[in-house]
Amino acid sequence: MKEIPEIKLAMVGTTFEACKLIGFNFADETVGKRSKSGGQPDISALAQTSAFPACTKEMTFYSQIDPVGDDACLADIGMACVFDCFETESFIQ
């Protein structure tokens, strides 16, 4: 399995409306700041996802995207994670 070094990603609004959307009033201070490519997923259960369900090829953790704010939140402050085998498939969880 290929491993990508961790690269932190910052949420930066490019318009006034986008800047107003960033941030949380009631979530832990780390929420909204966990987006990254490479390294290991911050949610330990996701680190166990190492094979693509359809073909069982070993997958590499590629990135995680944290929600940006209270008004643009994924479910209960969840993250979108991407795994890839770099051959045929990507798997978004």
Image (cartoon, grey):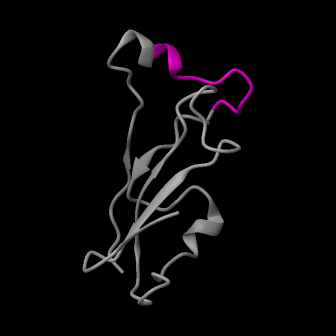
**For residue 46, above or below residue 36:** below
Residue at figure coordinates x 55%, y 38% from the top left: 67
How many numbered marks have been drawn onto this rendered protein structure?
0
**Left or right side of 1 for 41:** right
* Quadrant placement of the N terminus: bottom left
**For residue 81, above or below residue 12:** below
Coordinates of residue 91 in the picture (x, y in percent): 43, 69
Of all residues, the one furthest to the right in this rendering is: 26
Residue 28 image-quadrant placement:
top right
Of all residues, the one furthest to the left in this rendering is: 87
Residue at figure coordinates x 38%, y 54% from the top left: 6
Coordinates of residue 40 in the picture (x, y in percent): 48, 62
Coordinates of residue 11 in the picture (x, y in percent): 42, 30
Magenta: main secondary structure? loop
Residue 54 image-quadrant placement:
bottom left
Coordinates of residue 13 in the picture (x, y in percent): 38, 21
What's the magenta region?
Answer: 19-29
**Left or right side of 8 for 27:** right
**Left or right side of 67 for 3:** left
Q: Is residue 21 magenta?
A: yes
Task: Return the residue nearer the eye: 67 or 42.
Answer: 67
Residue at figure coordinates x 40%, y 33% from the top left: 10
Task: Return the residue nearer the eye: 7 or 54.
Answer: 54
